[in-house]
Image (cartoon, grey):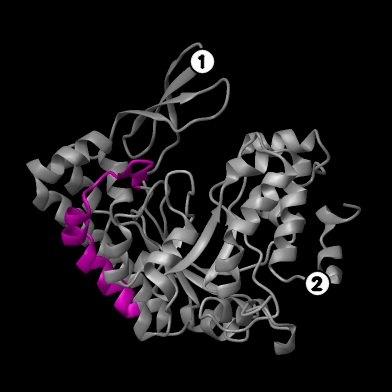
Amino acid sequence: MGDSIINLGVGELTHRERFRRVMHFQKVDRIPHWEFGYLRETLDRWHGEGLPAQYDDDPSVEAYFGVDPAVQVPVVHGPVPAFEGGLQVLEERANSRIERLPDGTVQEVQTKGVATIPHYIKMPIENRDDWLRFKERLDPEDPRRFRTDYEELGRRLLPCDRPVGINIGSYFGKPRDWIGFEHICLMLYDDRPLIEDIVETLTRIYYRQIEEALKYVEVDFAAGWEDICFRSGPMISPEAFREIVGPRLKRVCDLLRQHGCTVIWTDCDGDVTRLVPVWLEAGLNCMFPLEVHPGSDPVKYRKVWGRQILLRGGIAKYKLAGSKRGILDELKRVEPVVEEGGYIPHGDHRIPEDVSYENYRYYVREKLAMLGWRDDEVAQIEALRQL
């Protein structure tokens, strides 16, 4: 493999050692095998094509396919106390249902056909009074946020052989969920101080939770969520994102780095290219899940940003529904980046229902070969036996 970081001479590593070394461009025995889950419709299809019935959710299917494990440190980022009460059905329609959630959200959900993102009719935060109702539940010092014994957890995880991660929250995606797409875009102009207050409040919660956990727990990665981009780019201008989110995210990233955590990503679909410089400036250095079709391509990103950028994902999921030749070509496309390091390849989102069980098994086997897995390691994976 030439200058590949994959080198059996380093000896067999633990999952944790392997993750740390890959993400720092160091030699490893093999690259970690991670994936990003599956649509419900995909698992239903696969059960008819050979997937044993007992494997029926993301964790069990990932274990069946030999996905490497990781550990997540618990944090409490949401409203405390949580909004109480169950889902209330307001109206049943021919193909959908109108529901009210405990926080006040009113949504229409599909009840027939392929499940989709709900259509939101009313959002829980539409004005400052709504925000104050939420803000009462977002006290970063509420003692109910600190019920985890981090000191004991830190002692238990110190010898852990799996990579340990912590959640860094959502700085614009979560406010968008509360306010609504159109409304938050207008609010950026009509009431920017309100947006600033929401983002600042959330940042204080994230910072305080992480600060308390990292007093005792050693973490290897930090992960957030945004989903604020489409195939045409972000829903907020990079300039506004830099001004509103940048300094706040940087506070959290600086805290993580002070405690030795230098692998920080957020989950954002679509074309994130225009936001990458802002994230890098703030200290968020890993892009995930790298949806290829819109333009978030790991090969392109490594050429542009070199080793200052880390990568997760970037295998075009739609290619897995095609021919086996096409699957191999897609793996070959990213192989040079894999061999350089700083990259864990996997599907660029949840595997869709047009991917057959046979194709997915083939993809996993060939991906593991590219990642440097030995034949005896592959043979231990239940899903790949007799393939």
* Mark 1 and mark 2: Cα distance apart in space: 49 Å
Magenta-highlighted stretch: main secondary structure? helix
Give the residues in magenta: 228-255
Q: Is residue 171 magenta?
A: no
Q: 219 or 189, which is in the foreground?
A: 189
Q: Position of residue 330 (x, y in %)?
A: 62, 52
Write down the quadrant of residue 123 in the picture.
Answer: top left
Please, what secondary structure does the residue beneath circle 2 have? loop
Q: 253 or 160, which is in the foreground?
A: 253
Q: Is residue 240 magenta?
A: yes
Query: In this image, 190 relative to 301: left or right?
Result: left
Badge 1 or badge 2: first in the primary sequence: 1
Q: Position of residue 44 (x, y in %)?
A: 71, 34
Residue placed at 50% from the left, 11% from the top? 94
Q: Is residue 63 visible?
A: no
> Disc number at residue 95?
1
Q: Residues within 10 Å of mark 2 (few under 14, many from 20)?
A: few
Mark 1 belongs to which amino acid?
Asn
Residue placed at 21% from the left, 41% from the top? 184
Query: In this image, 60 relative to 217: left or right?
Result: right
Residue placed at 56% from the left, 74% from the top? 340
Q: Residues within 10 Å of mark 1 (few under 14, many from 20)?
A: few
Residue placed at 33% from the left, 53% from the top? 79
Q: Residue furthest top?
A: 94
In which quadrant of the rendered image does the N terminus lie? bottom right
Q: 9 or 54, which is in the foreground?
A: 9
> Disc number at residue 213?
none
Write down the quadrant of residue 245 in the picture.
Answer: bottom left
**Residue receiving disc 2:** 374
Q: Is residue 263 visible?
A: yes
